[in-house]
Amino acid sequence: MSFLHLFATPLSRVQACGLAIALLWSTGWVDSQSRVLLFNQHLFDWVEKQYGEPARQRVEDLQTLVTLHLKDREVDKLAEVNRFFNKVRYDEDYELWDQKDYWATPFEVLGLNAADCEDYALSKYFTLVSMGVPEEKLRVTYVKSITLKQAHMVLAYYSSPAAEPVILDNLIPDIKPATARTDLVPVCSFNGADLWLSVNRVEGKKVGGSDRIKRWQNFQKKLAQQMGEGS
């Protein structure tokens, strides 16, 4: 993952989170809401033109998943979405995009049928929001993987503000409570509204809004353009 250098030398969580956010923050942005995935003719035509007919079918499969499970319990939505995206093969940004650090949208992920850890986490996040899971229950989370000895990204789900989160991760198929993931050390997390500094595997301290994260801003603009919404 491209944030490996954050952990090249020993850092406190505060330092590591500060470095991560410094790489993301720029000038302000008025929107902080997460966009909902819209499946329409513009999107399908764009995907097929960019990646071919099999890619279009994969995006249509995502539409089917979202539609079929809209009324499911949230825990079942988590399982379906986690399973769907974990079938996508893993590869690094350099191989996929010839870039050091690229956040691919769910449609780009399905276009190439490949992703890195950031792409898995973001794709799951936006799909679950589109299925009606409140964004305040979801946090895209930077962690240090002890097993991989490098930075990593996962998606955390909180059933309630005080609940222990469960972790959706491309490294393992099962969704497990955060305390069971002793291989992961949380650093910081964010969603469409807020930023948190991790206190431990369960708790986080809110440290600001996500409305100034440049990469988050650019990601949502790109997502809107792919769905034909303009900039």
Image (cartoon, rainbow, N blue to C red):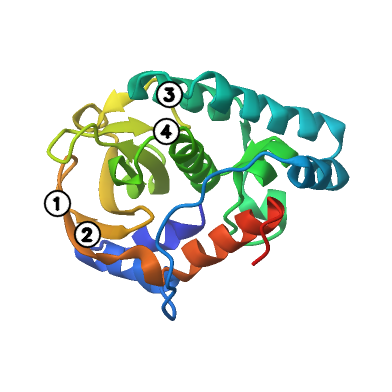
| Circle 4: residue type | Asp
Tell whether 53 sits left or right of 192. right
Whether residue 12 appears in this view of the structure is: no
**Mark sitting on residue 77:** 3
- Foreground mark, 3 or 4, reads 3
Tag 2–tag 1 contact (CB < 8 Å): no
**Mark sitting on residue 13:** 2
| Circle 2: residue type | Arg
- Residue placed at 41% from the left, 57% from the top? 33
Spatial separation of the CA atoms under disc 2 and disc 1: 8 Å
Going from N to C along the chain, the mark reached first, 2 or 1, is 2
Q: Residues within 10 Å of mark 2 (few under 14, many from 20)?
A: some
Spatial separation of the CA atoms under disc 3 and disc 2: 31 Å
Spatial separation of the CA atoms under disc 1 and disc 4: 20 Å
Going from N to C along the chain, the mark reached first, 1 or 4, is 4
**Mark sitting on residue 100:** none
- Residue placed at 67% from the left, 25% from the top? 61
Residue labelled with disc 1 = 199
Residue that extends furthest to the bottom in the rendered view of this protein: 27
Whether residue 34 appears in this view of the structure is: yes
**Mark sitting on residue 169:** 4
